[in-house]
């Protein structure tokens, strides 16, 4: 299995939906590097194929990472990509349940940073708040949580829907121009891989849907996120990056 090729296909698919994807990840890594130095221990939360960790290890070679997700197909791609990499450990755990923190098998204060991107909006608000609290316990004093996601600016809430419609139209144009897979096309492609097809079927059972069509998304405001971070025990909070209806919210433990 050509894991790097699958990573390239995943990146192209994600980039079509999020043209500024690299910018938001870079913004998170800027914060981590400035706040925690050249060798941070990272928790890559809802890691998918390990996109964030790939970039962390290139930019900060002295770093290490624990990757967490519940999706067996994406975790298999991550495991194949990082096979033999001593700086990386991969863990299956479900953020929908507070028990994910204990499934991780890490003590409190084990990490310098918790990073996550375009994932927590799939959770209901109470679990987003819960994940913030659970992640806070895993961070050292001064540790960073950075969440890059669909995060509405309340002052521009009236523009949220048309902005998303514009972004969707643009992503369709990019997909046509670059021949990048769309979301459903990605999963259809994986089902055609004998090594991964059973894991995609397992994924469908976990999420109770096919090709992601029945997910319920929560588009919460930056005010909501910052308040939830403070309630979780983060002493300082703020917005590190924004583009239209997307942002990177940061909490300092």
Image (tube, grey):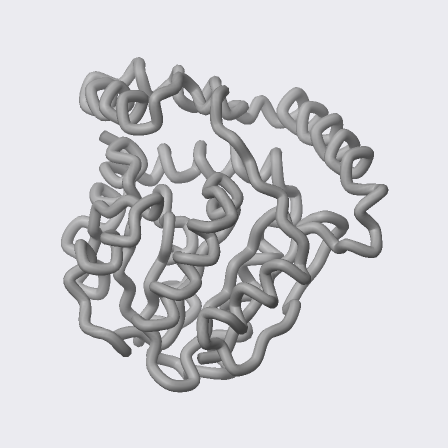
Tell me which residue sits at (77%, 54%) in the image. Answer: 154
- Residue 55: tell me if it is visible: no
Q: How many marks?
A: 0
As rendered, which of 172 and 131 lies closer to the eye?
131
Point out the image quarter for the C terminus: bottom left
Residue closer to the observer: 81 or 88 = 88
The image shows residue 199 at horizontal and vertical percentages of 22, 25
Check the image and report above or below for 11 versus 154. above
Q: To which quarter of the image does residue 67 belong?
A: bottom left
Question: Image quarter for residue 212?
Answer: top left
Residue at image coords 25%, 52%: 100
Q: Quadrant of residue 171?
A: top right
* Quadrant including the N terminus: top left
Residue 18 visible in the shown view = yes
Q: Residue at x 28, y 23 (%)?
A: 200
Position of 94 with respect to 12 (left or right) is: left
Q: Give the side of residue 122 with respect to residue 237, left or right.
A: left
Residue plotted at (35% across, 44% down): 96
Rendering coords of residue 69 (x, y %): 30, 45
Q: Is residue 144 above or below residue 182?
A: below
Q: Answer left or right for 88 relative to 26.
A: left
Residue 24 in percent (x, y) is at 59, 57
- In the rendered image, residue 144, in percent from the top left (x then y), is placed at 45, 74
Q: Is residue 139 left or right of residue 177?
A: left
């Amino acid at each position: 299995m050509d894991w790097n090729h699958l990573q390239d296909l995943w990146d192209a698919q994600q980039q079509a939906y999020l043209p500024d994807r690299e910018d938001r990840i870079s913004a998170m890594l800027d914060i981590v590097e400035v706040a925690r130095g050249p060798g941070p221990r990272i928790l890559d939360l809802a890691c998918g194929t390990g996109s964030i960790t790939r970039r962390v290890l290139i930019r900060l070679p002295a770093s290490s990472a624990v990757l967490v997700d519940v999706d067996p197909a994406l975790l298999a791609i991550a495991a194949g990509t990082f096979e033999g990499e001593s700086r990386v450990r991969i863990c299956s755990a479900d953020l929908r349940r507070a028990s994910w923190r204990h499934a991780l098998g890490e003590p409190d204060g084990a990490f310098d940073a918790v990073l996550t991107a375009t994932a927590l909006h799939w959770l209901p608000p109470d679990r987003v708040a819960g994940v913030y609290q659970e992640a806070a316990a895993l961070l050292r004093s001064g540790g960073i949580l950075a969440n890059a996601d669909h995060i509405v600016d309340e002052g521009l809430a009236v523009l949220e829907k048309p902005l998303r419609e514009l972004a969707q139209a643009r992503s369709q144009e990019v997909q046509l121009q670059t021949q990048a897979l769309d979301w459903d096309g990605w999963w259809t492609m994986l089902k055609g891989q004998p090594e991964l097809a059973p894991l995609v079927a397992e994924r469908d059972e976990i999420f109770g849907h096919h090709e992601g069509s029945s997910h319920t998304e929560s588009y919460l405001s930056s005010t909501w996120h910052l308040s939830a971070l403070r309630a979780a025990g983060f002493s300082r909070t703020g917005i590190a990056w924004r583009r239209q209806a997307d942002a990177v919210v940061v909490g300092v433990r």
